[in-house]
């Protein structure tokens, strides 16, 4: 009996020792984990503090640069025009970390008035103010914008397509009485498109505005507006009436005009392309249009005998009473557009050429 009690006591003692050792081990593990977590938190805190210090140093450096460094820069005067590359960055001061004022569009005309002697940055004049661009962001030469890709020659046919500006098609506005025909004509049948169609007996025709192309610095990006016509129909004749709004936007006009004709020919290789002269007399633009027509094998229809003739134009201050009784006073936008006599004169010369 006594022996059994001794064995039991020894067994219990062993169990207690094992339990104690397990407890000590667990406590040691927890302590190590606690210490490791504290070390991790401390390291993270130190890293955050270092990052904050770095950001503060960079902010202070930028502030100093913005406030004082720009005054140290010197410039040599320039008077040149370059073209912007894609997303050219305009900065407030002539160095890489200066505040960004905006970006320029591809081939936007850039008037350069100086170059920084210390950083090579160009000083430009834009929107009546000054900014700075990296020399890597501008080009002395116009950058060719590739033509949109064509998907094939359509099989369906139509007689004629007219591509033009407001003289070909202008939407309804508060400024005039029309609703989607040649701006200035008193009725659709009075504009040059509908007179030409009626005189030639065309059974199928389309007319559309590509006015935005005239103003654009990236004209080839506007050409896909033609797709809903030239990608669906093979036209016998395509008349292009564009150029009146190019004045002041003549950079690379010749290249862009030729590219338009090339793009049309991708879809309509057999169409006769007719270039209609300007209604307003802009000699440089007309000279370019004639040159492109000759080089590209297009028919050119002259309007030289009616250009600038006041009897063919709407006059500012004149009034027109529409069929519904509304009285319109010719404003600065409508003034100069063809009146009914002007549209008839345009149509006569186009019909004779066709």
Image: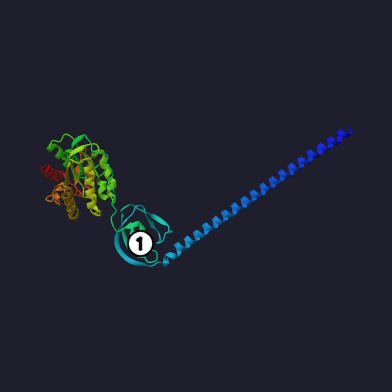
Give the colour scheme shown. Answer: rainbow
- Residue 331 drawn at (x, y percent): 23, 48
Judge left or right: residue 47 versus residue 274.
right
Residue at (47% x, 63% y) in the render = 64
Q: Nearer the viewer, residue 39 or 16?
A: 16
Q: Nearer the viewer, residue 311 or 34?
A: 34
Q: Where is the N terminus found, in terms of image quarters? A: top right
Pointer 1: residues within 10 angstroms few (<14), some, or many (20+)? many
Which picture quadrant has residue 132? bottom left
Mark 1 sits on what residue?
Answer: 122
- Residue 340 drawn at (x, y percent): 15, 43
Which picture quadrant has residue 94? bottom left
Residue 279 seen by the camera: no
- Residue 314 drawn at (x, y percent): 18, 47
Judge left or right: residue 80 versus residue 134.
left
Residue farthest along the top direction in this orientation: 1
Residue at (34% x, 67% y) in the render = 76
Residue 23 seen by the camera: yes
Q: In the rendered view, tell whether residue 267 sits above or below residue 256.
A: above
Which picture quadrant has residue 208? top left
Q: In the rendered view, tell whether residue 138 sits above or below residue 31.
A: below
Q: Where is the C terminus found, in terms of image quarters? A: top left
Residue at (19% x, 55% y) in the render = 284
């Amino acid at each position: 009996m006594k022996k059994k009690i001794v064995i039991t006591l020894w067994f219990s003692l062993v169990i207690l020792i094992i339990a104690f050792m397990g407890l000590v081990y667990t406590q040691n593990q927890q302590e190590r984990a606690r210490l490791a977590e504290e070390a991790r938190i401390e390291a993270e805190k130190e890293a955050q503090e270092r990052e904050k210090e770095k950001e503060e140093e960079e902010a202070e450096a930028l502030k100093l640069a913005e406030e004082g460094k720009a005054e140290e820069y010197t410039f040599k005067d320039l008077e040149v025009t370059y073209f912007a590359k894609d997303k050219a960055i305009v900065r407030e001061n002539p160095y890489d970390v200066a505040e960004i004022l905006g970006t320029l569009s591809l081939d936007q005309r850039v008037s350069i008035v100086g170059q920084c002697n210390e950083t090579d940055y160009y000083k430009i004049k834009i929107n009546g103010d000054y900014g700075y661009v990296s020399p890597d962001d501008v080009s002395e030469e116009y950058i060719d914008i590739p033509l949109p890709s064509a998907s094939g020659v359509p099989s369906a046919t139509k007689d004629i397509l007219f591509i033009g500006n407001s003289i070909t098609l202008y939407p309804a506005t508060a400024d005039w009485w029309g609703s989607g025909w040649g701006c200035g004509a008193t009725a659709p049948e009075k504009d040059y498109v509908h007179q030409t169609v009626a005189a030639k007996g065309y059974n199928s025709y389309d007319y559309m505005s590509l006015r935005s192309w005239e103003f654009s610095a990236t004209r080839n990006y506007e050409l896909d507006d033609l797709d809903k016509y030239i990608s669906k129909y093979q036209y016998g004749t395509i008349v292009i009436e564009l150029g009146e709004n190019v004045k002041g936007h003549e950079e690379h006009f010749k290249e862009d005009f030729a590219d338009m004709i090339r793009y049309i020919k991708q879809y309509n290789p057999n169409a006769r392309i007719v270039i209609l002269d300007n209604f307003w007399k802009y000699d440089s633009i007309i000279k370019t249009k004639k040159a492109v027509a000759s080089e590209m094998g297009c028919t050119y229809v002259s309007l030289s005998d009616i250009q600038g003739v006041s009897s063919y134009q709407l006059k500012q201050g004149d009034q027109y009473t529409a069929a519904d009784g509304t009285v319109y006073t010719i404003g600065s936008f409508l003034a100069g557009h063809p009146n009914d006599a002007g549209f008839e004169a345009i149509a006569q010369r186009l019909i004779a050429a066709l």
